[in-house]
Amino acid sequence: MPPSPDAECRYVGEWVSTKLRWRLTVDDRELQALKVYADGPGEDTIVCYEPAV
């Protein structure tokens, strides 16, 4: 995670959009970490992405 708590939501949003764009898998541990941010400080973050061709 970034050293600044103010950057966490953006970081997680970018992380998720990259996973979605490239159709990358998520293991159980990573999924649980993402859920913590989705239900907490990043809950209002909108994730936008374009699927890779």
Image (cartoon, grey):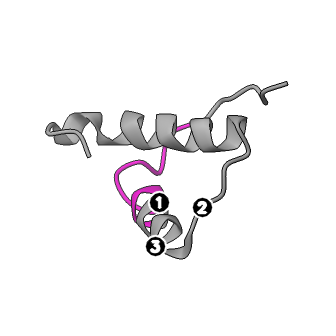
Mark 3 or 1, closer to the camera: 3
Question: Residues in magenta?
Answer: 36-46
Are dots 3 and 1 in contact, CB under 8 Å?
no
Q: In the picture provided, is 11 more to the left or to the right than 21?
A: left
Question: Residue 6 bears which disc, if any?
Answer: none
Residue that badge 1 annotates: 34
Q: Is residue 13 magenta?
A: no
* Residue drawn 47% across the image and 64% down it: 30
Task: For the residues labelled 1 and 2, say whether their Cβ atoms are less than 8 Å apart.
Answer: yes
C-alpha distance separating marks 3 and 1: 9 Å
- Residue hosting label 3: 29
For the C terminus, which image quadrant? top right
Give the CA distance from mark 3 to mark 2.
8 Å
Residue in the image at 30% along x and 42% along y: 8
- Quick one: SS at disc 2? loop
Judging depth in this view, the residue of 53 and 45 nearest the camera is 53
- The secondary element bearing badge 3 is classed as helix
Decide: few, some or many residues near mark 2? Use Cα within 10 Å; few <14, some 14-19, many ≥20.
Answer: few
Q: Is residue 16 left or right of residue 29?
A: right
Label 3 vs 1, first from the N-terminus: 3
Picture coordinates of residue 43, whole percent (x, y)? 47, 51
